[in-house]
Amino acid sequence: MPATSLATAPGAGRNAPTGLRMAGSGPGVRTARRRGSLAACAVVAGLALSLAAGPAHAVEGGASFFLLGGKLPLSGVVPGPGVYFQNDMYFYSGDLGGSVELPIGGQIIANVEGFVFFEAPTILTVLPHEILGGRVGFGLTVPSGYSDVQASLNQFEIEDDVFTIGDPIPAAMIGWDSGNFHWSLTGTLNVPIGDYQEGGIAQIALHRWAGDISAGLTWLDPATGWELSGLAGVTFNGENLTTDYNSGNEFHAEAGVIKHFNPAFSLGLLGYYNHQISPDSGSRLGAFEGEVGAIGGMAEYNFAVSGHPVTARAKYFHEVHAVNRLQGDAVFLTLATPLWVPGHAAPDQAEPLK
C-alpha cells in the first residue's frame, strides 16, 4: 500500500487535514480541489451529528442531548470556510432489562423496549476570517423522526409510537491546527420548542433546555493515513417543566483509530462512554444515575456526482455496558456535501503538504 499525503483544501487553514492524496499521483488543481472538498465533507459529517439529540443513552426517558459517537472521525477538525449541508440518519434499538425502571412522560415504566429512527439535516457555515487564530463555524440542526416504545406500567403492557419533529439545535465551534495536530471547541444548545407529546412514553423532542461543551483532538499523519481522534465534554441538562423532572448533568467521551487508505476509502475502530455526574431529581426513583459504554466501527467512501463531491459514511455501535439506561445497538448513515466554498487554490497552492 503506497503512502498518503495531505492536499491543501480551498479556503482551509494551512495545516487543516482537508484531503488525502496518494503519493506519486499528479498534483493537478482539479484533483486537489475535488479531494479537498471531499474531505471537508468528511469533517462536516462528524461535526453535524454531534448537534443531534439522541434518544437512547441517559436521564429522563433515556434521552441524552449529546449523540454519542457522532463526532467521529476527525473530532478535532473544523473545515475551511464555506457552507456545508449534511443529512444524518440514526437508528437505535435497545431495552432496559430486569426490573429496572425508567422515568418518562411523568410516569415510571419498566421492561422497556425501544426503537427510534430520526433524520438530522444540518447546515454548517464556516466564516472566511479567523478569530483568535482559529476557524469559526455556526450550525443548525432540526431532527425529525419516529419512536416506538413498549413497556410495563402498573403491571399493564403498554405501547406508544410517534412520528414528529424534535427540538432545533444551534451550535458554534472554533478549531486550530499545528502540524499533524488539530483541536476544536464546540458548544451546542437544545431549544425546547419541538413537538413534545405530553403524557407519551415515545418522544423525539426532549422538551428541556440543555447545553453541551466539548473539546476534540485529532492527530492525522499525512504520510501514512493513520488518524487518532477523541472528544470529551459535559452536558448540562435543565428541567422538563411539563413533568417537573430535572435531569442530571453528564460526562461523555469517544475515541477512534482510523485508517485512510486513499482519498476515497477509510475504515475505523470506534468507541464511546457516558457517565452521569449529578443525579436526576423529580421522581420517586430518587438519585437516578447511570452510564453506558459501546464499541463499534465505521466505513467511509468519498465520491463525486456530476463533479460535485459527496461523503458517505456508515457507523455501528454495540453497547457492552449500561446502568439505568437502555442497552442496545446504534447505526449512523451519513451523506454530506459542500454547498459553497469561496475561492479555489491557485495551481502553485494545490501541491500536497509534505
Image (tube, helix red, strand yellow):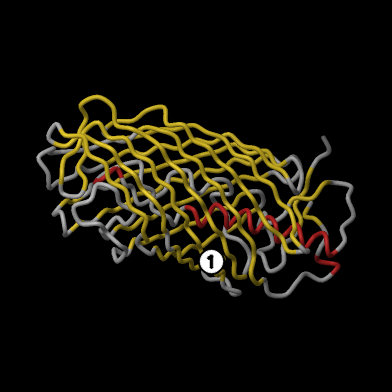
Q: Is residue 272 left or right of residue 99?
A: right
In the rendered image, residue 53, in percent from the top left (x then y), is placed at: 38, 53
Q: Is residue 256 above or below residue 190?
A: above
Q: Nearer the viewer, residue 307 or 68?
A: 307
In the rendered image, residue 84, in percent from the top left (x then y), is placed at: 59, 66
Q: Nearer the viewer, residue 49 or 353?
A: 49
Instruction: State the residue lying farthest toward the top.
Output: 98
Q: Nearer the viewer, residue 35 or 351?
A: 35
In the rendered image, residue 132, in percent from the top left (x then y), is placed at: 52, 68
Q: Is residue 183 above or below residue 327?
A: below
In the rendered image, residue 316, in percent from the top left (x then y), is placed at: 53, 37
Residue plotted at (57% across, 71% down) = 130
Residue plotted at (26% across, 45% down) = 61
Residue plotted at (22% across, 43% down) = 278
Amino acid identity at mark 1: Leu
User: Total label count?
Assistant: 1
Residue plotted at (46% across, 51% down) = 215
Q: Quarter-wise, where is residue 315 in the image?
A: top right
Quadrant where the N terminus is found in the figure: top right
The residue beneath circle 1 is: 124
